[in-house]
């Protein structure tokens, strides 16, 4: 299953550029509304908005998204994207990156189930969790 984010305010390009920088993702594909046969249906009439984009993260996971027309907009809520770090240093790097300019809802810290766990909402309103599991012998 691959999450798909629909940005109601036209922030897809900015968000995906941010995710590339903060999380080390690679852009596999991006297509604007102007580059499609549906150019006249671009959100707000702006053909530079993203019709579809795909990012691949270092672990191979995929995130897709677009700028959606206002009639299809739904607010972000009721879910979080979860990042699983291989070690504490990676957890700290990921959390610092994704929370930059956003709001930390639970600081990254040691819990009874993880070496590090934290939650935040990024500057685009998307909720994230960062988890670094405990070593099996912990």
Image (cartoon, rainbow, N blue to C red):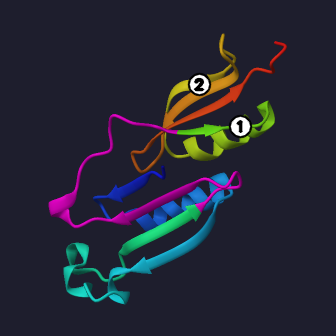
Residue 92 position in % (x across, y down): 72, 35
The one of 26 and 10 positioned closer to us in this rendering: 26
Badge 2 local density, few (<14 within 10 Å), some, or many (20+)? some
User: Which mark, residue 27?
Assistant: none
Residue 95 position in % (x across, y down): 63, 38
Residue 24 position in % (x across, y down): 69, 57
Work out which quarter of the rendered image holds the C terminus and state it.
top right
Classify residue 107 by image quadrant. Answer: top right
Q: Tell me if residue 63 is in the magenta stretch.
A: yes
- The earlier-in-sequence mark between 1 and 2 is 1
Residue at the image position 64 percent from the left and 30 percent from the top? 131
Q: Which residue is mark 1?
A: 85
Residue at the image position 53 percent from the left and 30 percent from the top? 119
Residue 35 position in % (x across, y down): 37, 88
Local secondary structure at mark 1: loop
The Cα atoms of the two marked residues, 1 and 2, are separated by: 15 Å
Classify residue 132 by image quadrant. Answer: top right
User: Which mark, residue 107?
Assistant: 2
Q: Tell me if residue 61 is in the magenta stretch.
A: yes
Q: Which residues are magenta?
A: 56-81
């Amino acid at each position: 299953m691959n999450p798909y984010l629909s940005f109601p305010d036209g922030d897809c390009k900015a968000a995906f550029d941010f995710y590339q920088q903060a999380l080390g993702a690679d852009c596999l594909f991006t297509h604007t509304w102007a580059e499609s046969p549906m150019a006249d249906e671009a959100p707000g009439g702006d053909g530079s908005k993203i019709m579809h984009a795909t990012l691949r993260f270092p672990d191979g996971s995929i995130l897709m998204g677009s700028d959606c027309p206002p009639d299809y907009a739904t607010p972000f809520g009721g879910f979080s994207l979860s990042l699983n770090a291989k070690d504490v240093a990676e957890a700290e790097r990921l959390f610092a990156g994704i929370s930059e300019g956003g709001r930390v809802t639970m600081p990254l810290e040691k819990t009874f189930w993880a070496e590090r766990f934290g939650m935040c909402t990024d500057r685009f309103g998307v909720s994230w969790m960062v988890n670094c599991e405990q070593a099996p012998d912990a």
